[in-house]
Image: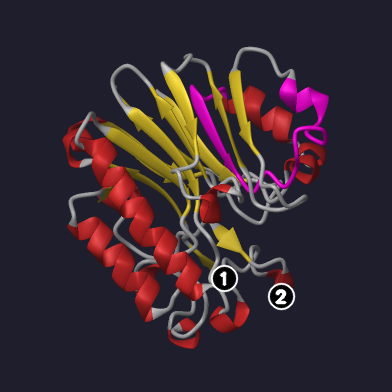
Amino acid sequence: MLLISWNVNGIRACLRKGFLDFLREYNPDVLAIQELKADMKSIPPEVKNFPGYYKYFYPAKRKGYAGTALFTRIKPVSVKYGIGNEEYDSEGRVITADFEKFYFVNIYFPNAQHGLTRLDYKLRFDDDIHRYLNNLREEKPVVVCGDFNVAHKEIDLANPKQNVKNAGFTPEERAWMDRFIEDGWIDTFRMFTKEGGHYTWWSYRFNARARNIGWRVDYFIVSPELRDRVKRSWILKDVMGSDHAPIALEIDI
């Protein structure tokens, strides 16, 4: 299976920048989208009606904000929106697809924001999603993907020293990621690529993408029993259309 995750930074804007061409070219079995930024009425019909996929949209209640979506060629046994906590679920942050052999969880983690005004909110979300994923793991294997809004290690961003106290690289956020990985969850990209310089998000300012001054904040994570089934995990760094690059996972499942 080819699985792709992409923070599109607004489905309407991404559509104008080639989203459907991307979908036709890569033809993934499952595509997870974060930052939908559209309610059901404003999702373009070309997206809603794109052939060959079952589609699940989970907009935030606030217009033009957050939200997630799932495109899948294989019909899930069931799909769950949210994790049962209205504080997060009102922002459309989690879609769980129950497939026959595994759970697929698409997550848009909160951003701690400038001045760390939402750091406490993000850390609560992080802990609650950790428990949620561990509970799923007790039932069957789990594939998790999305924009985690944290660069885990110093090699996961271009300028670590300057960003220690900034959103996405605070000691608290990184400590949570440490706990999550130490709990047996596997960062699939690091199974294949050990060096730095590989990023999934770049600021629109200062020509950052062309200069590769970025952060790796988007991940495909799997539960430990899937380790040997992962064939490849990589960043589609040349795909434009968003300030994030899509990420891909090839897995035998």
Q: From the top left corner, tell me how far across and down residue 156 is, in percent.
A: 41, 66
The residue at 65%/23% (across/down) is: 24
For the residue carrying disc 2, how many other residues have a C-alpha within 10 Å: few (<14), some (14-19), or many (20+)? few
In primary-sequence order, the first of circles 1 and 2 is 2
Residue at image mark 2:
206
Q: Which residues are magenta?
A: 27-48
| Residue 187 left/right relative to 21 | left
Which one is nearer the viewer's eye here, 92 or 248? 92
Residue at image mark 1:
213
Can you say which quadrant of the picture contains the C terminus? top left
Q: Mark yes or no: residue 186 visible.
A: yes
Count of marks overlaid on the render: 2
Kind of residue sitting beneath label 1? Ile
Q: Mark yes or no: residue 187 visible.
A: no
The residue at 63%/32% (across/down) is: 57
| Residue 218 left/right relative to 225 | right
Which one is nearer the viewer's eye here, 99 or 251? 99
The residue at 33%/62% (across/down) is: 195
Give the Cα distance between marks 1 and 2. 9 Å
| Residue 248 left/right relative to 43 | left
Which one is nearer the viewer's eye here, 20 or 82? 82
The residue at 60%/27% (across/down) is: 56
Is residue 28 shown above or below 85? above
Q: From the top left corner, tell me how far across and down residue 176 is, in percent.
A: 31, 67
- Residue 102 is labelled as none
**Helix, strand or loop at disc 2?**
helix
Is residue 172 shown above or below 35? below
